[in-house]
Image: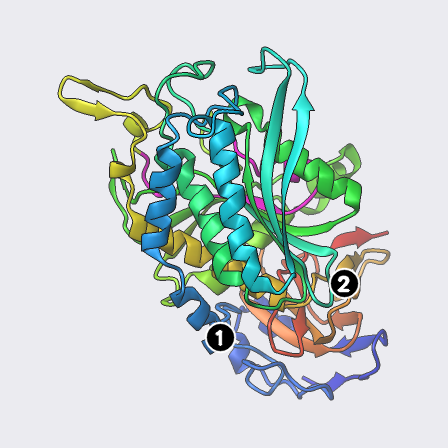
Amino acid sequence: MDTTTSTSAGTPRRVFLSAAVAAAAVPAAGLSFAAPAAAAPPGSTGAGIVPPPPHPQPPSPELRALLREVDPARIEATVRRLAAFHTRHTLSSQDDPHRGIGAARDWIYAQMKESARASGGRMTVEKQSYLQPPADRIPVATRITNVVATLHGDTDPNRTYVISGHYDSRVTDVMDFTSYAPGADDDASGVAVSMELARVMARHHFDATLIFAAVAGEEQGLYGSTHLANVLAKRGADVQGMFTNDIVGSSNGQGGAAPHVLRLFAEGVPTSETPDQAAIRQAVGGENDSPARQLARFVRSVADNRATGMDVRMIYRRDRYLRGGDDIPFLEQGWPAARFTEPVEDFRHQHQDVRVEDGVQYGDLPRFCDFGFIAGVARVNGATLWSLAKAPGMPADVRIDSTQLTNDTTLLWQHGGSTPVSGYDVLWRETTAPEWEHVVHVGQTTQVTLDISKDNVFFGVRAVGRNGMRSPAVFPVPQF
Protein backbone atom coordinates (compact mmCIF):
# COMPACT_ATOMS: atom_id res chain seq x y z
CA MET A 1 0.00 0.00 0.00
CA ASP A 2 1.18 3.57 -0.56
CA THR A 3 0.79 6.80 1.31
CA THR A 4 0.64 10.47 0.50
CA THR A 5 1.05 12.73 3.50
CA SER A 6 1.46 16.29 4.64
CA THR A 7 3.05 17.29 7.94
CA SER A 8 1.27 20.60 8.34
CA ALA A 9 -1.37 20.52 11.08
CA GLY A 10 -4.91 20.55 9.78
CA THR A 11 -3.94 19.39 6.26
CA PRO A 12 -5.88 16.36 5.03
CA ARG A 13 -3.93 13.12 4.91
CA ARG A 14 -4.95 10.16 2.79
CA VAL A 15 -3.81 6.72 3.86
CA PHE A 16 -4.58 3.81 1.53
CA LEU A 17 -4.99 0.54 3.37
CA SER A 18 -5.93 -2.60 1.52
CA ALA A 19 -9.61 -3.29 1.99
CA ALA A 20 -8.98 -6.94 1.23
CA VAL A 21 -6.31 -7.17 3.89
CA ALA A 22 -8.47 -5.34 6.42
CA ALA A 23 -11.42 -7.58 5.66
CA ALA A 24 -9.23 -10.62 6.16
CA ALA A 25 -8.19 -9.22 9.57
CA VAL A 26 -4.48 -9.74 8.86
CA PRO A 27 -2.47 -8.50 11.88
CA ALA A 28 -1.36 -4.92 11.42
CA ALA A 29 2.27 -5.82 12.02
CA GLY A 30 2.19 -7.77 8.77
CA LEU A 31 1.05 -4.84 6.64
CA SER A 32 3.44 -2.95 4.39
CA PHE A 33 3.08 0.72 5.23
CA ALA A 34 5.41 3.57 4.36
CA ALA A 35 6.31 5.71 7.37
CA PRO A 36 4.55 9.09 7.55
CA ALA A 37 6.75 12.16 7.22
CA ALA A 38 6.02 12.96 10.86
CA ALA A 39 7.99 10.91 13.38
CA ALA A 40 6.27 7.79 14.64
CA PRO A 41 5.44 7.91 18.34
CA PRO A 42 7.57 6.07 20.90
CA GLY A 43 6.47 2.46 21.12
CA SER A 44 5.62 2.15 17.41
CA THR A 45 7.45 -0.12 14.97
CA GLY A 46 8.86 2.90 13.13
CA ALA A 47 6.66 2.01 10.18
CA GLY A 48 3.68 3.94 11.47
CA ILE A 49 1.93 0.77 12.67
CA VAL A 50 1.81 -0.44 16.27
CA PRO A 51 1.30 -4.22 16.45
CA PRO A 52 -2.17 -5.25 17.61
CA PRO A 53 -3.62 -5.02 20.08
CA PRO A 54 -2.79 -1.30 20.61
CA HIS A 55 -2.55 -2.07 24.30
CA PRO A 56 -0.86 -1.82 26.72
CA GLN A 57 0.90 1.50 27.29
CA PRO A 58 3.78 0.46 29.55
CA PRO A 59 4.46 2.50 32.70
CA SER A 60 7.49 4.77 32.63
CA PRO A 61 10.24 4.51 35.27
CA GLU A 62 8.89 7.71 36.84
CA LEU A 63 5.40 6.24 37.12
CA ARG A 64 6.75 2.99 38.54
CA ALA A 65 8.60 4.97 41.20
CA LEU A 66 5.44 6.89 42.08
CA LEU A 67 3.40 3.70 42.43
CA ARG A 68 5.98 2.28 44.81
CA GLU A 69 5.25 5.21 47.13
CA VAL A 70 1.69 3.99 47.76
CA ASP A 71 1.81 2.82 51.37
CA PRO A 72 -0.53 0.08 52.64
CA ALA A 73 0.25 1.06 56.23
CA ARG A 74 -0.94 4.62 55.65
CA ILE A 75 -4.06 3.30 53.95
CA GLU A 76 -4.76 1.06 56.93
CA ALA A 77 -4.29 3.96 59.34
CA THR A 78 -6.75 6.05 57.32
CA VAL A 79 -9.41 3.34 57.24
CA ARG A 80 -9.09 2.65 60.96
CA ARG A 81 -9.21 6.34 61.84
CA LEU A 82 -12.34 6.91 59.79
CA ALA A 83 -14.01 3.87 61.34
CA ALA A 84 -13.22 5.26 64.82
CA PHE A 85 -15.61 8.23 64.46
CA HIS A 86 -18.42 5.83 65.55
CA THR A 87 -20.66 6.94 62.70
CA ARG A 88 -20.19 9.13 59.64
CA HIS A 89 -23.85 9.17 58.71
CA THR A 90 -24.80 12.28 56.76
CA LEU A 91 -27.40 13.19 59.41
CA SER A 92 -25.02 12.67 62.35
CA SER A 93 -23.40 15.45 64.38
CA GLN A 94 -21.45 18.10 62.49
CA ASP A 95 -20.20 19.82 65.65
CA ASP A 96 -18.91 17.04 67.92
CA PRO A 97 -15.08 17.07 67.69
CA HIS A 98 -14.81 13.32 68.22
CA ARG A 99 -17.89 11.58 66.78
CA GLY A 100 -19.98 11.97 63.68
CA ILE A 101 -19.57 13.20 60.14
CA GLY A 102 -18.34 16.63 61.17
CA ALA A 103 -15.36 15.23 63.05
CA ALA A 104 -14.54 12.96 60.08
CA ARG A 105 -14.85 15.89 57.68
CA ASP A 106 -12.42 18.01 59.69
CA TRP A 107 -9.90 15.18 60.01
CA ILE A 108 -9.94 14.49 56.27
CA TYR A 109 -9.52 18.21 55.57
CA ALA A 110 -6.50 18.43 57.90
CA GLN A 111 -4.87 15.41 56.27
CA MET A 112 -5.44 16.76 52.77
CA LYS A 113 -4.00 20.14 53.80
CA GLU A 114 -0.90 18.37 55.11
CA SER A 115 -0.48 16.53 51.80
CA ALA A 116 -0.88 19.80 49.89
CA ARG A 117 2.15 21.30 51.65
CA ALA A 118 4.42 19.25 49.39
CA SER A 119 2.92 20.76 46.22
CA GLY A 120 4.51 24.18 46.44
CA GLY A 121 1.13 25.85 46.32
CA ARG A 122 -0.18 23.90 43.32
CA MET A 123 -2.63 21.86 45.42
CA THR A 124 -5.51 23.66 47.11
CA VAL A 125 -7.92 22.07 49.60
CA GLU A 126 -11.47 23.21 50.32
CA LYS A 127 -14.53 22.25 52.28
CA GLN A 128 -17.13 22.46 49.55
CA SER A 129 -20.48 22.92 51.32
CA TYR A 130 -24.10 23.62 50.54
CA LEU A 131 -27.37 23.38 52.46
CA GLN A 132 -29.52 20.54 51.19
CA PRO A 133 -33.26 21.21 51.71
CA PRO A 134 -35.46 18.35 52.91
CA ALA A 135 -35.56 15.64 50.23
CA ASP A 136 -35.47 11.89 49.85
CA ARG A 137 -33.61 10.46 52.88
CA ILE A 138 -32.96 14.03 54.08
CA PRO A 139 -35.77 14.78 56.59
CA VAL A 140 -34.47 18.21 57.63
CA ALA A 141 -32.28 20.81 55.97
CA THR A 142 -28.75 19.40 56.20
CA ARG A 143 -25.35 20.78 55.36
CA ILE A 144 -23.52 18.53 52.89
CA THR A 145 -19.75 19.04 52.75
CA ASN A 146 -17.24 17.56 50.33
CA VAL A 147 -13.53 17.73 51.05
CA VAL A 148 -11.82 18.47 47.74
CA ALA A 149 -8.07 18.61 47.05
CA THR A 150 -7.24 20.09 43.63
CA LEU A 151 -3.79 19.68 42.08
CA HIS A 152 -3.80 22.36 39.41
CA GLY A 153 -2.37 21.52 36.00
CA ASP A 154 0.61 23.41 34.61
CA THR A 155 -0.28 23.89 30.95
CA ASP A 156 -3.84 22.65 30.42
CA PRO A 157 -5.53 23.36 33.77
CA ASN A 158 -9.14 23.33 32.58
CA ARG A 159 -8.79 19.71 31.50
CA THR A 160 -9.78 17.86 34.66
CA TYR A 161 -9.74 14.33 36.06
CA VAL A 162 -11.53 13.37 39.28
CA ILE A 163 -11.28 10.46 41.70
CA SER A 164 -13.47 10.17 44.76
CA GLY A 165 -14.63 8.04 47.64
CA HIS A 166 -17.57 8.84 49.91
CA TYR A 167 -16.89 9.35 53.60
CA ASP A 168 -20.45 8.99 54.91
CA SER A 169 -21.53 5.62 56.32
CA ARG A 170 -24.72 3.79 57.29
CA VAL A 171 -26.19 0.71 58.97
CA THR A 172 -29.22 -1.40 58.06
CA ASP A 173 -31.69 1.45 58.50
CA VAL A 174 -30.50 4.19 56.16
CA MET A 175 -32.10 6.81 58.43
CA ASP A 176 -30.34 5.59 61.62
CA PHE A 177 -27.72 8.27 62.30
CA THR A 178 -26.74 7.30 65.87
CA SER A 179 -25.79 3.61 65.77
CA TYR A 180 -22.22 2.40 65.32
CA ALA A 181 -21.54 2.62 61.57
CA PRO A 182 -17.79 2.14 60.99
CA GLY A 183 -18.10 2.04 57.19
CA ALA A 184 -14.63 0.56 56.68
CA ASP A 185 -15.15 -1.02 53.27
CA ASP A 186 -18.11 1.21 52.32
CA ASP A 187 -16.44 3.56 51.89
CA ALA A 188 -13.46 4.44 54.06
CA SER A 189 -11.54 2.26 51.60
CA GLY A 190 -12.36 4.56 48.69
CA VAL A 191 -11.60 7.68 50.72
CA ALA A 192 -8.24 6.14 51.67
CA VAL A 193 -7.45 5.68 47.95
CA SER A 194 -8.23 9.33 47.24
CA MET A 195 -6.27 10.61 50.25
CA GLU A 196 -3.23 8.41 49.60
CA LEU A 197 -3.00 9.49 45.97
CA ALA A 198 -3.34 13.15 46.96
CA ARG A 199 -0.33 12.63 49.23
CA VAL A 200 1.74 10.76 46.66
CA MET A 201 0.93 12.89 43.62
CA ALA A 202 1.12 16.34 45.25
CA ARG A 203 4.86 16.52 44.60
CA HIS A 204 4.52 15.92 40.87
CA HIS A 205 3.65 18.19 37.96
CA PHE A 206 0.95 17.44 35.41
CA ASP A 207 -0.41 19.19 32.35
CA ALA A 208 -4.02 18.70 33.44
CA THR A 209 -5.76 19.22 36.79
CA LEU A 210 -6.34 16.34 39.21
CA ILE A 211 -9.08 16.38 41.83
CA PHE A 212 -8.99 14.08 44.86
CA ALA A 213 -12.37 14.17 46.59
CA ALA A 214 -14.04 12.76 49.67
CA VAL A 215 -17.75 13.35 49.19
CA ALA A 216 -20.67 13.14 51.60
CA GLY A 217 -24.31 12.17 51.21
CA GLU A 218 -23.76 9.16 48.96
CA GLU A 219 -25.83 6.76 51.05
CA GLN A 220 -28.67 9.29 51.23
CA GLY A 221 -28.81 9.79 47.46
CA LEU A 222 -25.51 10.90 45.82
CA TYR A 223 -25.95 14.43 47.18
CA GLY A 224 -22.27 15.32 47.61
CA SER A 225 -21.13 14.05 44.22
CA THR A 226 -24.05 15.77 42.54
CA HIS A 227 -22.95 19.04 44.11
CA LEU A 228 -19.33 18.47 43.06
CA ALA A 229 -20.39 17.77 39.47
CA ASN A 230 -22.59 20.87 39.44
CA VAL A 231 -19.77 23.05 40.77
CA LEU A 232 -17.39 21.80 38.08
CA ALA A 233 -20.02 22.32 35.38
CA LYS A 234 -20.63 25.89 36.50
CA ARG A 235 -16.89 26.54 36.40
CA GLY A 236 -16.79 25.28 32.83
CA ALA A 237 -14.32 22.52 33.69
CA ASP A 238 -13.50 20.09 30.90
CA VAL A 239 -13.91 16.87 32.87
CA GLN A 240 -12.43 14.15 30.67
CA GLY A 241 -12.52 11.38 33.26
CA MET A 242 -14.01 10.58 36.68
CA PHE A 243 -13.72 7.48 38.85
CA THR A 244 -15.54 6.66 42.02
CA ASN A 245 -13.86 4.15 44.32
CA ASP A 246 -16.69 2.60 46.29
CA ILE A 247 -16.34 -0.65 48.22
CA VAL A 248 -12.73 -1.36 47.25
CA GLY A 249 -11.63 -2.73 50.62
CA SER A 250 -11.33 -6.48 50.20
CA SER A 251 -10.61 -9.21 47.69
CA ASN A 252 -12.48 -11.81 49.77
CA GLY A 253 -16.24 -12.18 49.56
CA GLN A 254 -19.06 -14.62 50.00
CA GLY A 255 -18.39 -15.97 46.53
CA GLY A 256 -14.67 -16.63 47.02
CA ALA A 257 -11.49 -14.60 46.65
CA ALA A 258 -9.75 -12.83 43.78
CA PRO A 259 -6.75 -11.08 45.37
CA HIS A 260 -5.57 -9.22 42.27
CA VAL A 261 -8.85 -8.49 40.46
CA LEU A 262 -10.58 -5.11 40.46
CA ARG A 263 -13.94 -4.60 38.78
CA LEU A 264 -14.48 -1.51 36.65
CA PHE A 265 -18.12 -0.78 35.82
CA ALA A 266 -18.66 1.31 32.68
CA GLU A 267 -21.97 2.08 31.05
CA GLY A 268 -22.75 1.49 27.37
CA VAL A 269 -25.63 3.69 26.31
CA PRO A 270 -24.77 7.10 27.81
CA THR A 271 -26.89 8.31 30.71
CA SER A 272 -26.96 11.76 29.08
CA GLU A 273 -27.98 10.53 25.63
CA THR A 274 -30.49 12.75 23.83
CA PRO A 275 -33.21 11.47 21.49
CA ASP A 276 -31.21 12.66 18.47
CA GLN A 277 -28.10 10.87 19.73
CA ALA A 278 -30.13 7.73 20.37
CA ALA A 279 -31.41 7.81 16.78
CA ILE A 280 -27.84 8.02 15.45
CA ARG A 281 -26.70 5.19 17.69
CA GLN A 282 -29.59 3.01 16.58
CA ALA A 283 -28.64 3.66 12.96
CA VAL A 284 -24.87 3.18 13.07
CA GLY A 285 -24.14 1.32 16.31
CA GLY A 286 -21.76 2.29 19.06
CA GLU A 287 -23.54 0.82 22.08
CA ASN A 288 -20.15 -0.45 23.24
CA ASP A 289 -18.31 2.78 22.41
CA SER A 290 -19.62 5.28 24.95
CA PRO A 291 -17.17 7.74 26.51
CA ALA A 292 -17.28 5.62 29.68
CA ARG A 293 -16.30 2.46 27.77
CA GLN A 294 -13.44 4.28 26.03
CA LEU A 295 -12.23 5.49 29.41
CA ALA A 296 -12.43 1.95 30.80
CA ARG A 297 -10.43 0.59 27.86
CA PHE A 298 -7.83 3.24 28.60
CA VAL A 299 -7.63 2.08 32.23
CA ARG A 300 -6.92 -1.46 31.10
CA SER A 301 -4.23 -0.23 28.73
CA VAL A 302 -2.27 1.69 31.38
CA ALA A 303 -3.11 0.08 34.74
CA ASP A 304 -3.54 -3.65 34.14
CA ASN A 305 0.12 -4.58 34.53
CA ARG A 306 2.87 -5.67 36.92
CA ALA A 307 3.47 -2.15 38.15
CA THR A 308 0.02 -2.11 39.75
CA GLY A 309 -0.13 -5.83 40.45
CA MET A 310 -3.80 -5.82 39.49
CA ASP A 311 -6.05 -7.29 36.81
CA VAL A 312 -8.78 -4.83 35.80
CA ARG A 313 -12.00 -6.62 34.91
CA MET A 314 -14.22 -4.37 32.84
CA ILE A 315 -17.94 -4.92 33.43
CA TYR A 316 -20.28 -3.79 30.66
CA ARG A 317 -22.91 -2.09 32.82
CA ARG A 318 -23.17 1.12 34.82
CA ASP A 319 -23.28 -0.63 38.19
CA ARG A 320 -24.37 -3.79 39.99
CA TYR A 321 -28.01 -4.77 40.33
CA LEU A 322 -29.94 -2.50 42.72
CA ARG A 323 -26.91 -0.25 43.19
CA GLY A 324 -25.57 3.09 42.00
CA GLY A 325 -22.62 5.33 42.79
CA ASP A 326 -21.04 8.76 42.66
CA ASP A 327 -20.10 8.42 39.01
CA ILE A 328 -23.76 8.87 38.02
CA PRO A 329 -23.93 12.69 38.50
CA PHE A 330 -20.86 13.00 36.26
CA LEU A 331 -22.44 10.74 33.64
CA GLU A 332 -25.53 12.94 33.78
CA GLN A 333 -23.31 15.90 32.84
CA GLY A 334 -22.15 13.98 29.76
CA TRP A 335 -18.65 13.30 31.15
CA PRO A 336 -16.80 9.96 30.98
CA ALA A 337 -17.07 8.27 34.38
CA ALA A 338 -16.84 4.77 35.83
CA ARG A 339 -16.85 2.87 39.11
CA PHE A 340 -14.15 0.75 40.74
CA THR A 341 -15.43 -1.98 43.09
CA GLU A 342 -13.85 -5.03 44.72
CA PRO A 343 -14.17 -8.35 42.85
CA VAL A 344 -16.34 -10.37 45.24
CA GLU A 345 -18.54 -8.65 47.80
CA ASP A 346 -19.54 -9.87 51.25
CA PHE A 347 -22.95 -8.37 51.91
CA ARG A 348 -22.72 -9.27 55.60
CA HIS A 349 -20.23 -6.41 55.85
CA GLN A 350 -22.20 -3.76 53.96
CA HIS A 351 -25.17 -1.69 55.17
CA GLN A 352 -25.45 -3.86 58.28
CA ASP A 353 -25.93 -3.24 61.98
CA VAL A 354 -22.79 -4.38 63.80
CA ARG A 355 -23.78 -7.61 65.57
CA VAL A 356 -23.09 -11.30 65.94
CA GLU A 357 -25.89 -13.53 64.71
CA ASP A 358 -25.73 -17.34 64.75
CA GLY A 359 -22.01 -17.06 65.33
CA VAL A 360 -21.50 -14.80 62.29
CA GLN A 361 -20.07 -11.30 62.63
CA TYR A 362 -22.03 -8.68 60.71
CA GLY A 363 -21.01 -5.08 60.14
CA ASP A 364 -18.57 -3.07 58.06
CA LEU A 365 -15.53 -3.41 60.34
CA PRO A 366 -11.86 -2.71 59.52
CA ARG A 367 -10.97 -6.31 60.38
CA PHE A 368 -12.59 -7.41 57.12
CA CYS A 369 -10.47 -5.10 54.95
CA ASP A 370 -7.39 -6.16 53.00
CA PHE A 371 -5.10 -3.13 53.07
CA GLY A 372 -2.66 -4.55 50.55
CA PHE A 373 -5.56 -4.93 48.14
CA ILE A 374 -6.63 -1.31 48.71
CA ALA A 375 -3.05 -0.28 47.92
CA GLY A 376 -3.38 -2.14 44.62
CA VAL A 377 -6.58 -0.23 43.90
CA ALA A 378 -4.73 3.01 44.64
CA ARG A 379 -1.99 2.01 42.19
CA VAL A 380 -4.57 1.37 39.46
CA ASN A 381 -6.06 4.80 40.07
CA GLY A 382 -2.62 6.39 40.26
CA ALA A 383 -1.41 4.82 37.00
CA THR A 384 -4.61 5.95 35.31
CA LEU A 385 -4.49 9.53 36.58
CA TRP A 386 -0.80 9.84 35.73
CA SER A 387 -1.32 8.53 32.20
CA LEU A 388 -4.32 10.78 31.58
CA ALA A 389 -2.80 13.97 32.95
CA LYS A 390 0.61 13.49 31.29
CA ALA A 391 -0.99 12.82 27.89
CA PRO A 392 -2.79 15.31 25.64
CA GLY A 393 -6.52 15.76 25.94
CA MET A 394 -8.82 13.72 23.76
CA PRO A 395 -9.38 14.90 20.19
CA ALA A 396 -12.44 17.12 19.90
CA ASP A 397 -15.38 16.99 17.48
CA VAL A 398 -14.38 13.62 16.01
CA ARG A 399 -16.52 12.86 12.97
CA ILE A 400 -16.85 10.27 10.26
CA ASP A 401 -17.83 11.53 6.82
CA SER A 402 -21.13 9.94 5.89
CA THR A 403 -22.17 12.40 3.19
CA GLN A 404 -21.45 9.92 0.38
CA LEU A 405 -21.78 6.21 -0.26
CA THR A 406 -18.17 5.00 -0.46
CA ASN A 407 -16.15 1.93 0.45
CA ASP A 408 -13.54 3.95 2.32
CA THR A 409 -13.63 6.01 5.50
CA THR A 410 -12.80 9.67 6.07
CA LEU A 411 -12.32 10.82 9.67
CA LEU A 412 -12.05 14.45 10.79
CA TRP A 413 -11.30 15.96 14.21
CA GLN A 414 -9.97 18.96 16.09
CA HIS A 415 -7.14 19.31 18.57
CA GLY A 416 -8.43 19.13 22.14
CA GLY A 417 -6.90 21.21 24.95
CA SER A 418 -3.62 23.07 24.97
CA THR A 419 -1.11 20.23 25.43
CA PRO A 420 1.03 19.85 22.27
CA VAL A 421 0.74 16.63 20.28
CA SER A 422 3.14 14.72 18.07
CA GLY A 423 0.19 13.46 16.07
CA TYR A 424 -2.83 11.20 16.19
CA ASP A 425 -3.61 7.49 16.07
CA VAL A 426 -6.57 6.03 14.23
CA LEU A 427 -7.78 2.75 15.72
CA TRP A 428 -10.23 0.21 14.40
CA ARG A 429 -11.67 -3.17 15.26
CA GLU A 430 -14.29 -5.63 14.15
CA THR A 431 -17.77 -4.62 15.31
CA THR A 432 -17.89 -7.78 17.44
CA ALA A 433 -14.51 -7.20 19.12
CA PRO A 434 -14.45 -5.74 22.66
CA GLU A 435 -11.00 -4.12 22.37
CA TRP A 436 -9.22 -2.12 19.68
CA GLU A 437 -7.39 -4.45 17.29
CA HIS A 438 -5.41 -2.20 14.92
CA VAL A 439 -3.90 1.26 14.95
CA VAL A 440 -2.12 3.52 12.50
CA HIS A 441 -0.26 6.69 13.43
CA VAL A 442 -1.26 9.43 10.95
CA GLY A 443 0.93 12.27 12.20
CA GLN A 444 -0.05 15.90 12.76
CA THR A 445 -3.18 16.07 10.69
CA THR A 446 -6.85 16.46 11.52
CA GLN A 447 -8.27 14.50 8.59
CA VAL A 448 -7.49 11.10 7.17
CA THR A 449 -9.04 8.74 4.64
CA LEU A 450 -8.58 4.99 5.06
CA ASP A 451 -9.28 2.39 2.41
CA ILE A 452 -11.44 0.44 4.84
CA SER A 453 -15.22 0.45 4.70
CA LYS A 454 -16.82 2.39 7.53
CA ASP A 455 -19.72 -0.05 7.29
CA ASN A 456 -17.63 -3.01 8.45
CA VAL A 457 -15.61 -1.85 11.47
CA PHE A 458 -15.65 0.62 14.34
CA PHE A 459 -13.13 3.48 14.44
CA GLY A 460 -11.63 5.68 17.10
CA VAL A 461 -9.14 8.55 17.18
CA ARG A 462 -6.69 9.35 19.98
CA ALA A 463 -4.05 12.03 20.51
CA VAL A 464 -0.38 11.21 21.00
CA GLY A 465 1.80 13.53 23.06
CA ARG A 466 5.38 14.50 22.37
CA ASN A 467 6.27 12.19 25.26
CA GLY A 468 4.58 9.29 23.44
CA MET A 469 1.67 9.11 25.88
CA ARG A 470 -1.77 8.63 24.40
CA SER A 471 -5.22 9.90 25.27
CA PRO A 472 -8.30 7.70 25.43
CA ALA A 473 -9.88 7.08 22.07
CA VAL A 474 -12.91 9.00 20.84
CA PHE A 475 -15.64 7.28 18.85
CA PRO A 476 -16.67 9.35 15.81
CA VAL A 477 -20.18 10.59 15.14
CA PRO A 478 -21.54 10.82 11.60
CA GLN A 479 -21.06 14.02 9.64
CA PHE A 480 -24.05 14.35 7.35
Q: How is the image coloured?
A: rainbow
Residue under pointer 1? 62
Q: Nearer the viewer, residue 167 or 401?
A: 167
Q: Secondary structure at mark 2?
A: loop
Q: Residue at x 68, y 23 (%)?
A: 131
64 lies left or right of 159 = left
Foreground: 449 or 89? 89
Q: Secondary structure at mark 1?
A: helix
Quadrant in which residue 233 is drawn:
top right
Residue furthest out toward the left: 359
Say left or right for 56 vs 46: left
The amino acid type found where label 2 is placed reads Gly
Residue 171 visible in this rendered orientation of the protein: yes
- Residue at x-position 79% and y-position 66%: 415
Q: Which residues are magenta?
A: 323-345
The quarter of the picture where residue 231 lies is: top right
Disc with the residue nearer the chain's start (2 vs 1): 1
Instruction: Give the number of the mark in front: 2 or 1.
Output: 1
Left or right of 335: which side holds 313? left
